[in-house]
Image (cartoon, rainbow, N blue to C red):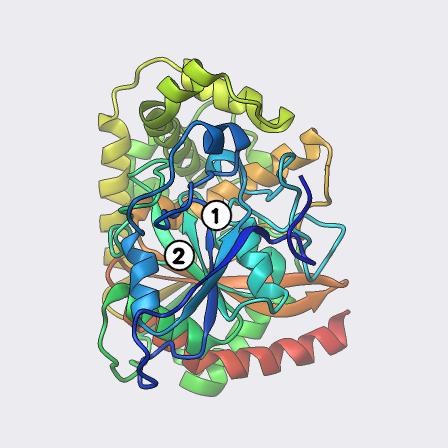
């Protein structure tokens, strides 16, 4: 199928005007796009796969998250391409085409909310809606050089959003401007405007950044200088997150398989990733196995094997997975308290090349999910912030705050953003 925009971001274009004409609304004058996982009244929700679209009827209701931003004054201009069944973080789709990464056309845009990220990164819309289960907003935001926010789990209704794995599914969003990111967040989260609060502590886990191939001068170095300028260096704390998780999340030991390659990962974080992926697989099977076995859909070659593995997987006792979730949330809540921030690499390196060989991609994916699972398993909120370019490829960093601290995190991004971009510009000039 042909791509429907210059960046290949859209699967379908249409106009949904705001539901109020008031000029005083927070999102007045802004345009947005939605991932093709959200129901829009009168349109079939395609879920990234033509066979899904062919075997489903048009939605009769619009997802509450979409209604919220329409009521906030924004105009919807269409639906965006996504990875099939939200089952990948690459952003490649053999049926509808792979949206072109605006920062690096020879690299993947990231997924599964690929089109939503590209639409924002290419300047086609002011913001967009995506979903994030295992990283599907944070990853494409990083690869496309824009802001991406995954809210606290259950903070925003996922009604009218096709489920992937409900224990992890969230409605996220992308923007280029931190003020827009904040305004969209307040509409979606139904939050009042509140004054920014100074962070109490900012934790930098050096072990997590050891997983990244990006020089520290371009990541933590930029953030540390920004924090020192705005808040002073006394709030910066260096920690070893892997050791902390190993001690505080005993149920994770169940997932520390002997086969883990510790040379390129952190055992306790790899265990978090393993528990997350197994519970996701279990819930995905519950949601979609009947349709997959009945329809036998045409799936992309790289996805087909993994999706069928999920469908054929044995029944699981989910109790130990739930224990990992409960223990990690308690441990990170105790670490961060009310106004603490955990700094993380969003991803462990440069966006992969299009059609990268599977062996290299698997090593990268393993590291990526070890980092992404921290927010996924804990249910905490996380934002990916762009840090300019390194070797002509986009760089990012993430901030994570405790569950329910979305307003605090959104405000902090807006306070930090200009200083971070200034410091990133200096670093880019002297390290590229």
Image height check: is 35 above or below 399?
above
x%, y% of residue 108? 67, 47
Q: Is mark 1 on a helix, strand or loop?
A: loop
Which label was assigned to residue 309?
none
Which label's residue is closer to the chain start, 2 or 1?
Answer: 1
Location of residue 67 in the rendering, given as x and y in whole percent from the top left corner = 30, 60
Q: Are marks 2 and 1 in contact (CB under 8 Å)?
A: yes
Residue 217 seen by the camera: no
Q: Which residue is drawn at 46% across and 46% down?
A: 36
Where is residue 66 shown, x and y percent of the image? Answer: 34, 58
User: Would residue 245 appear left or right of 395 to someone viewing this image?
Assistant: left
Q: Can residue 81 be seen in this view?
A: yes
Tally the marks.
2
Q: Label 1: how many residues lie within 10 Å, few (<14), some (14-19) or many (20+)?
A: many
Q: Quadrant of residue 92?
A: top right
156 or 375: nearer the eye?
156
Specify the label residue 136 is tagged with: 1
CA gap between label 2 and label 1 equals: 9 Å
The quadrant the C terminus occupies is bottom right
Residue 190: image quadrant is: bottom left
> Is residue 99 positioned above or below 184 on the image?
above
Residue visible at 55% across and 37% down in the picture: 366
Q: Position of residue 272 (x, y in %)?
A: 39, 38
Q: Is residue 336 left or right of residue 32?
A: left
Dot 2: what SS? Answer: strand
- Rendered image quadrant of residue 37: top left
Residue located beneath label 2 in the image: 172
Q: Does 70 appear above or below 151?
A: below
């Amino acid at each position: 199928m042909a791509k429907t925009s210059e960046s290949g971001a859209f699967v379908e274009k249409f106009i949904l005007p705001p539901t109020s004409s008031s000029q005083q609304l927070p999102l007045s004058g802004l345009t947005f796009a939605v991932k093709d996982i959200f129901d829009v009244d009168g349109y079939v929700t395609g879920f990234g796969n033509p066979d899904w679209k062919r075997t489903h009827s048009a939605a009769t209701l619009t997802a509450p998250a979409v209604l919220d931003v329409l009521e906030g004054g924004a105009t919807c201009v269409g639906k965006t391409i996504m990875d099939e069944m939200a089952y990948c973080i690459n952003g490649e789709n053999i049926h509808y085409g792979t949206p072109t990464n605006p920062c690096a056309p020879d690299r993947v845009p990231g997924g599964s909310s690929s089109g939503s990220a590209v639409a924002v990164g290419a300047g086609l819309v002011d913001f967009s809606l995506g979903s994030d289960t295992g990283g599907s907003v944070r990853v494409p935001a990083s690869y496309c050089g824009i802001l991406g926010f995954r809210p606290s789990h259950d903070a925003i209704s996922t009604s009218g959003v096709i489920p992937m794995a409900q224990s992890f599914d969230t409605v996220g969003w992308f923007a280029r401007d931190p003020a827009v990111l904040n305004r969209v967040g307040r509409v979606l989260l139904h939050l009042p405007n509140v004054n920014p609060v100074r962070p109490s502590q900012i934790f930098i886990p050096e072990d997590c950044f050891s997983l990244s191939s990006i020089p520290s001068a371009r990541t933590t170095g930029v953030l540390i200088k920004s924090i020192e300028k705005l808040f002073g260096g006394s709030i910066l704390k260096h920690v070893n997150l892997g050791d902390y998780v190993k001690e505080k999340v005993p149920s994770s030991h169940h997932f520390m398989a002997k086969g883990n390659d510790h040379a390129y990962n952190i055992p306790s974080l790899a265990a978090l990733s393993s528990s997350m992926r197994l519970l996701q697989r279990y819930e995905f099977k519950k949601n979609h196995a009947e349709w997959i076995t009945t329809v036998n859909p045409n799936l992309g070659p790289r996805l087909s094997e993994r999706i069928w593995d999920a469908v054929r997987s044995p029944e699981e006792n989910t109790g130990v997975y739930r224990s990992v979730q409960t223990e990690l949330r308690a441990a990170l809540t105790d670490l961060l308290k009310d106004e603490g921030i955990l700094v993380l690499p969003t991803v462990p390196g440069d966006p992969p090349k299009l059609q990268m060989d599977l062996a290299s991609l698997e090593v990268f994916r393993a590291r990526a999910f070890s980092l992404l699972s921290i927010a996924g398993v804990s249910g905490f909120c996380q934002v990916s912030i762009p840090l300019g370019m390194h070797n002509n490829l986009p760089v990012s960093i993430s901030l994570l705050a405790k569950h329910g601290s979305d307003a605090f995190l959104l405000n902090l991004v807006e306070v930090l953003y200009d200083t971070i971009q200034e410091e990133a510009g200096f670093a880019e000039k002297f390290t590229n």
